[in-house]
Amino acid sequence: MAVCVNKIVGRAVGLVVGLLVAVMPMMAGATRDNLNIKRGEQLFAAVCRAQTTPVSFVYNGVSYRGLGKLRSESRNIVDAPDKRHATLVYSLDNNARVRVEAAFCKEYGQIEYTVWFENIGQEPTGVLEQVKSADFDLAGSRPVVRGCLGDHVNKYAPYEIDLLKDTASFRSDGGRATHVNFPYFDLVHGDGGTLIALGWAGTWQADFIARGKGVHFSAQNCNDFRSVLMPGEAVRTAMVVMLPYSGRNADDATNLWREWFQKYNMPRANANGDPIEPFVTTPFASDTGLPNSDGSISERFYTWKRTLERIVYERLRPDFRWFDAGWYFDPEGRTVPTNWWGTVGSWELDTVKWPNRSLRESNEACHKAGMKVLTWFEPERVTNVDALVRNYGYNAEWAISNGRGVITNDIGNPDCLRWTLSRIVKMMDENAIDLFREDNNSDPGTTWPLMDKRQQEKTQLPRTGITENKAIQGHYALWDSILAYCAGNGKCTFIDNCASGGGRNDIESLRRSIPFMRSDADRTTSALRLSMSSTFNKWVPFHGASTKETAHELDPAERGGTPIYVTRASWLPVYNMSMRFTHDETLDYDKIRFALNEWRQYSYLLTKDFYVLTPYHSHDDTSGWTVFAYHDREADKSIVQAFRQEKCEQEKYTVRLPYAKRGIRYRLTDEDTKESTVIDGEMLQTEGFAITLGSPKASAIFSLTLEN
């Protein structure tokens, strides 16, 4: 029986991007017991050998598996101290060539590759179809694939599939890669495994089938692609990332991935290459006293100052002011009172809300107070095309409408990309914006095929999938251009990544960005937040959630301030405060300061090794305990977060710490009571320690340090 995982609800750069990002200097070399660098070398060698390059396709009716049938044009392998990079070019025919870009990380044994198909001739190529980004076998008995599903309906629910009993198939057709399904996989096989991720922000499919003494893995992007390439056109596969490891332990695999990801996959804070440290954000929009329909649509030139002054006075200064949707004129050049969603596309500041230089002045005041400013854009979607053409120089041919209210901005078109980029950079430059936040509140998978159809009718040639492929190339190119502008102007060289929450968290997007909010749904309950953390944290170590608890996503935060139980359930490297600083007369500033300072005290540990010490629970299950641990391997220091949920009848829970070392004595301290005890590492591993919380919806924090 095949397990097709599509919808399971609650179960279960030089500057920016090279194939490998520069090493973060603060981190020592990898020393983990489960490193399998030799296997990584073998995989890299297979990618670089034409006969075993792990891709397949059909061209002009001829099937190719690997590139052994093609004539090699050039082969360039560069060996640097920390990595090996290969560019391999093959001739497909007089018009078409294939280029492979591959890299090997010597420290971790991680490999990656992307395959390009390019028309270098003067006429259309033959038909390219059935392109597999990956198509190869991995040896090893007892194959299992484990991971989590995507955002939206699946809320990052986990799965584990025994491939000797079932095949596993994952498919995403909406055009936002990590809604519903999630292109990250832990494939366990033999005496180890391979962590796999697909770097593609659009549609994709991945399949795992036990075969012989191993498992066959195949993947595609631009689902059902079938097209010729016009002169000068190039299309590409997903970037395939693989990190082999030894042993079958899930925690060891998780933490190898988290360490590699932060050292080599994350963007940097600035043009100097400094690492991104945990940080705090807050919007001012909840504190305007005006009706707010989400985003920053209620903010005005006269609403920000009292909020800024109050948070500075109360010693609650965040690192970022969050300026969200609703700041722009609509395509007719009119102010937008409520409908931010239906009026995007102009990217022209609403000077009714923000006359003269008032927005820049507010942002410069934030800078003076020690804060940066991030601003929301949605460049892949437009509205009211006729008005955009009339008022803002837009070209109607760039708009792809599905006839049901969604109009995609075709940034795969170079002219459209230039127009869109210029609007964004102009707004950021004129208003002293430090960081670009991107959203996408529609499924472009419903529109891209319509542009394909237009092109097919015009050329009388197959063009299925061409619009998507060029659009995702445009998506990455837009980000790279924005980051290059930011690097050249002293701004942040990373992006806040959002697509109705967690829709665009593919690994290549995360080379340029961080999900400041991993899900829109994460603006609701602490139970959902804890559930998501137990799975999403394993794959994306640096991200954020909300710090409020409400029944609905857009409900304002609780009067008086968020309870400590909820703020602790929100501990992630990005801490997002949202409250009415001056319009809630009951706000308990001492409680808010305590919660923020507590997070700041331990935030550096939230990027370290991560352990889930309790069984998974779904977003709507509040009957048990949730316990997490974050462990700094170098310092042998950790924290344990324990939560007795709302309907949990069990007042005591015993947790074992798998990372505690035998023969080492530790001091375990309850950070609420300051009571401590000295305990042997072997006992922490085997017998554990009991946590008692006398009432439901209670939490505790324990620190674990070496005893001198």
Image (cartoon, rainbow, N blue to C red):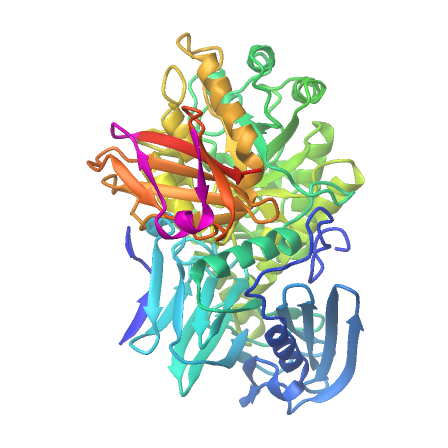
Does the magenta run of residues contain 105?
A: no
Please tell me which residue lies in front, 322 or 243.
Answer: 243
Q: In what quadrant of the picture does the C terminus appear?
A: top right
The residue positioned 43% from the left and 82% from the top of the image is 214
Q: Which residue lies furthest to the top in this view?
A: 585
- Whether residue 649 is visible to the viewer of this picture, yes or no, is yes
Q: In what quadrant of the picture does the N terminus appear?
A: bottom left
Height in image: 564 above or below 491?
Answer: above
Please tell me which residue lies in front, 230 or 690.
Answer: 690
| Number of residue marks | 0
Left or right relative to 99: residue 138: left
Within the image, what quadrant is residue 548 found in? top left
Height in image: 380 above or below 392?
Answer: below
Within the image, what quadrant is residue 8 found in? bottom left
Height in image: 561 above or below 519?
Answer: above
Q: Residue furthest left?
A: 649
The residue positioned 42% from the left and 25% from the top of the image is 672
Find residue 481 and report its horizontal and vertical position in percent.
Answer: 72, 48
Find residue 201 and report its horizontal and vertical position in percent.
Answer: 53, 57
Please tell me which residue lies in front, 426 or 691.
Answer: 691
- Whether residue 410 is visible to the viewer of this picture, yes or no, is no
Does the magenta run of residues contain 678?
A: yes
Find residue 69 and report its horizontal and vertical position in percent.
Answer: 64, 92
Left or right relative to 127: residue 526: left
Height in image: 364 above or below 405?
Answer: above
Please tell me which residue lies in front, 173 or 493.
Answer: 493
Find residue 77 and report its horizontal and vertical position in percent.
Answer: 77, 75
Which segment did they paint magenta?
A: 676-697
